[in-house]
Amino acid sequence: MSLEVHIHELHERHRQLEAEIDREILSPSGDDLAIAELKKRKLRLKEEIERLEADLTRAA
């Protein structure tokens, strides 16, 4: 798998996590701990995306 495809897939997972966070926040029974964990996962994905994009830029 190329690095560009991998980055694209990570962006898609990031968008899915954002949607999941929004649903959890809007839910009357929203779980604060679940929201916090989702936000941590989203941040880790964002950091990985940024690192890979920097690697891709350096390789170009």
Image (tube, rainbow, N blue to C red):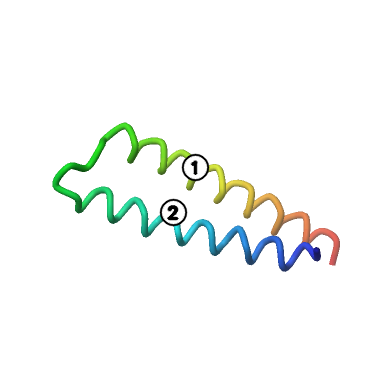
Query: At numbered mark 2, what does the secondary structure look like: helix, strand or loop?
Result: helix
Q: Position of residue 20 (x, y in %)?
A: 36, 54
Amino acid at pointer 2: Leu
For this orientation, the residue located farthest to the left is: 28
Question: In this figure, which residue is indicated by the disc labeled 1?
Answer: 41
Looking at the rendering, in which quadrant would you find the N terminus?
Answer: bottom right
The part of the image, by quadrant, that contains residue 8 is bottom right
Q: Position of residue 48 (x, y in %)?
A: 64, 48
Looking at the rendering, in which quadrant would you find the C terminus?
Answer: bottom right
Q: Residue at x 59, y 46 (%)?
A: 47
Q: Residue at x 19, y 50 (%)?
A: 27
Q: Residue at x 78, y 61 (%)?
A: 56
For this orientation, the residue located farthest to the right is: 59
Question: In this figure, which residue is indicated by the disc labeled 2?
Answer: 17
In the picture, measured across the screen, residue 37 lies left or right of residue 22, that is right
Q: Position of residue 42 (x, y in %)?
A: 48, 47
Q: Few, some or many C-alpha atoms within 10 Å of disc 2 (few <14, some 14-19, many ≥20)?
A: some
The one of 52 and 19 positioned closer to us in this rendering: 19
Q: Few, some or many C-alpha atoms within 10 Å of disc 1 (few <14, some 14-19, many ≥20)?
A: some
In the picture, measured across the screen, residue 55 lies left or right of residue 10, that is right
Which of disc 2 and disc 1 is earlier in sequence? 2
In the picture, measured across the screen, residue 15 lies left or right of residue 9, that is left
Amino acid at pointer 1: Arg
Q: CA distance from mark 1 to mark 2?
A: 8 Å
The part of the image, by quadrant, that contains residue 6 is bottom right
For this orientation, the residue located farthest to the front is: 29
* Mark 1–mark 2 CB contact (< 8 Å): yes
